[in-house]
Amino acid sequence: MRFLLALVGIAAVIVIAMISLGLLSFQTRPGTLPSVHVDAGTAPSVKADVATLSVGTENKVVDVPTVGTTQKTIAVPTLRMNKPADQASNANAQ
């Protein structure tokens, strides 16, 4: 891959050197745009038979699951933090 990149770079340098030394020149002539004449026309006609859609609501009976909750007493982890200034007051409180 590096070899191909180096080869393209060397070729570009050679072409630039040949152009600057006058060994390579391009003969160009100005181009012209083609003349275009547009007549007024009509858009194509399209006939399409499509389905009709109606959006609405209706009442139906469906099974809906319910979720119940109960209260239980469980042990949860706790975390107490005693700041250095509060250790003396916390020791007195306990």
Image (cartoon, helix red, strand yellow):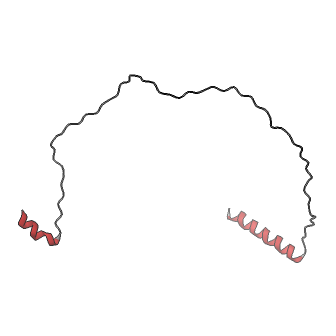
Comparing 38 with 62, the one in front is 38
Q: Quadrant of the N terminus?
A: bottom right
Picture coordinates of residue 81, whole percent (x, y): 18, 63
**For this rendering, which residue is in front, 9 or 90?**
90
User: Residue 5 at x, y = what percent?
Assistant: 71, 65
The answer to whether residue 90 is left or right of residue 26 is: left
- Judged from this view, the residue extending furthest toward the top is 61
Q: Is residue 49 left or right of residue 90?
A: right
Residue 74 appears left or right of 62: left
Residue at left 66%, top 27%?
50
Which residue does the image show at 15% across and 72% down from the upper left?
85
Closest to the observer: 48 or 16?
48
Location of residue 28 with respect to 35 vertically, above or below:
below
Q: Is residue 75 left or right of residue 40?
A: left
The C terminus, quarter of image: bottom left
Q: Is residue 53 above or below residue 8?
A: above
Please name the residue shown 15% across and 47% down the image: 75
Kindly indicate the quadrant of the structure image that contains residue 47: top right
From what the image shows, is residue 44 above or below residue 61? below
Figure check: 46 above or below 92 = above
What's the residue at 79%, 68% (across, down)? 11
User: What is the x, y in percent for residue 6?
Assistant: 72, 67
